[in-house]
Image: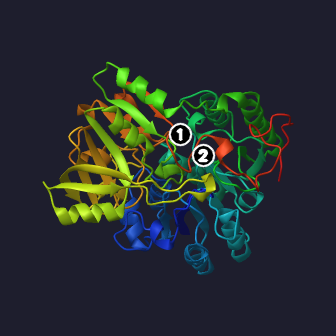
Amino acid sequence: MRLLIAMMSHETNTFSTVPTPLSRFSRGNTRPVPLEGEEIITAYRNTGSAVGAFIELAEAEGAEMALPIAAGAWPSGPVEDAAYAYMTDRICGAVEEGCDGILLQLHGAMVTESREDGEGALLARIRQIAPDTPIAVSLDMHTNMYPAIVENADIIAGYQTYPHVDVYETGMRAGKAFFSMIRGEARPTMAWGNRPMLPHVMRQGSDDSPNREIQALARELEGEGALCASFFTGFPHADIRLAGSSAVVVTDGDMRLAEDMRDRLLDLAWRERSKFVYEIEPLEKSLDRAAAMREDGPIILLDHYDNAASGGSMDTMAVLKGILDAGLEDVAAFAISDPAAVQTMIAAGIGEEVTVELGGKTDMPSIDRVGEPLSVTGRVRLISDGQFRNIGPMGKGVMNNMGPTVVLDTGKVEIVVISTQQEPNDFACFQSLGIDPLAKKYLMLKSRIHWRAGFRKIAKQVVDCAGVGVCTSDYDMLDFKNVRRPIYPLDEDLQPVSVE
């Protein structure tokens, strides 16, 4: 048996000006291209990834593996067409060489310079080459589902946790259903649908209602006979027609059951839609609350308007400026992405005092803001190559590469300054730089929900800090031109109709 295993993963924020060339997909690789062939096995075997699960299952079957590419990038602006062509050509070229089955770790919210649905276009192209070859796909919970994804796959499984600590488990769910199909033990049938709603990302956590109950129902449906049951909250920072929530249920040859289960997921989400709306607190009030807290720490200060996992530049300075102006002490901040400042501090050397114009290098025309650097003086405490491997539970064992990295110590705040965006979802992002998160009173994290994977258990308090950035939770700042209307909560007088 010859199986094709590949990854092409990107969540596109169409409001972001962070570019997405091919080099961005080399995350975890020291070369500016994605991993290929045996490199993928070395990088992903025994990791908390869907590709890791696919490799494990294929090896257990004694299958031969074709591994054309493993490309994953932190969210950013639309994917360059040349990068998309490079990735999809490698996958489709491997399909043309022949295989007995295809296992793909995709995202579900990839927008390119010329396509709203990057994954659907890839799957349609694969189907033209291999019309009868079984295809199983794992997808992110933030999938913006398009018909072409479902029409051209046999099995779809989506993450059931946010933060996404079940990426490996999702690969296993998709893979086990796939092998049941390969052996002739199951005849997968899929039903899908959507609802006109754009849940705020800050209200999508699977620890919180209503997504907690929706994902619990998805797991319950799998216990009742579904091969895979997935509710996708959707990614709202994509101004595309079908952005928003959807559901896919796979059953063993029973379309009526699949449709009933799909509707149970969608109806629950629609009934509870008001709980997906996030209320914003002004930054000054948030920092006043943080300053008054008496806990020893760590107190999490979330700079949630500017995070890597939603397409932020990670160089807006409003929250860090507020922390410095408020005189908060014993703070570690992760992170400011500013490669020019990093090089200035490397040139100065460890132990030297420097004054740098930090951050603010990125303009944000989609929210009518320009970059505003902040003059910061401190001592260069540490210089690093920026590479670290996740401890887990999210992406356990997966390699990250922040590029050249510096820790700048102002005396009150240790600021991690990196050369490319990196989500702070793991203890190792601090520990690899000699910072003990448990020893700090405050941790400033440019994150929304994923920080919970690595830090929720240690957090004494959490303060959401509404700063500046293209990950804003204020929909009034975003000029939606292409998303279907009416849609909740942009519009309130509407019916729960599925749209294809």
Dot 1: few (<14), some (14–19), or many (≥20) neighbours within 10 Å?
many
Instruction: Looking at the image, tell me whether mark 1 or mark 2 is earlier in sequence order.
Output: 2
Residue at mark 1 to residue at mark 2: CA–CA distance: 8 Å
| In contact (CB < 8 Å): disc 1 and disc 2 | yes
- Of the numbered discs in the image, which one, if any, rests on residue 472? none
SS of the residue at dot 1? loop
Residue occupied by mark 1 = 162
- Residue 321 image offset from top left, x and y in percent: 38, 42
- Residue 286 image offset from top left, x and y in percent: 46, 28
Left or right, 2 with reference to 287: right
The quadrant holding residue 198 is top right
Dot 2: few (<14), some (14–19), or many (≥20) neighbours within 10 Å?
many
Residue occupied by mark 2 = 141
- Residue 87 image offset from top left, x and y in percent: 55, 73
Q: Residue at x 43, y 56 (%)?
A: 360
Is residue 150 something that shows in the picture? yes
Left or right, 430 with reference to 109: left
- Residue 123 image offset from top left, x and y in percent: 68, 66
Q: Nearer the viewer, residue 32 or 49?
A: 32
Q: Is 98 located above or below residue 102 in the figure?
A: below
Residue flagged by tag 1: what amino acid is it? Tyr
The quadrant holding residue 178 is bottom right
SS of the residue at dot 2? loop
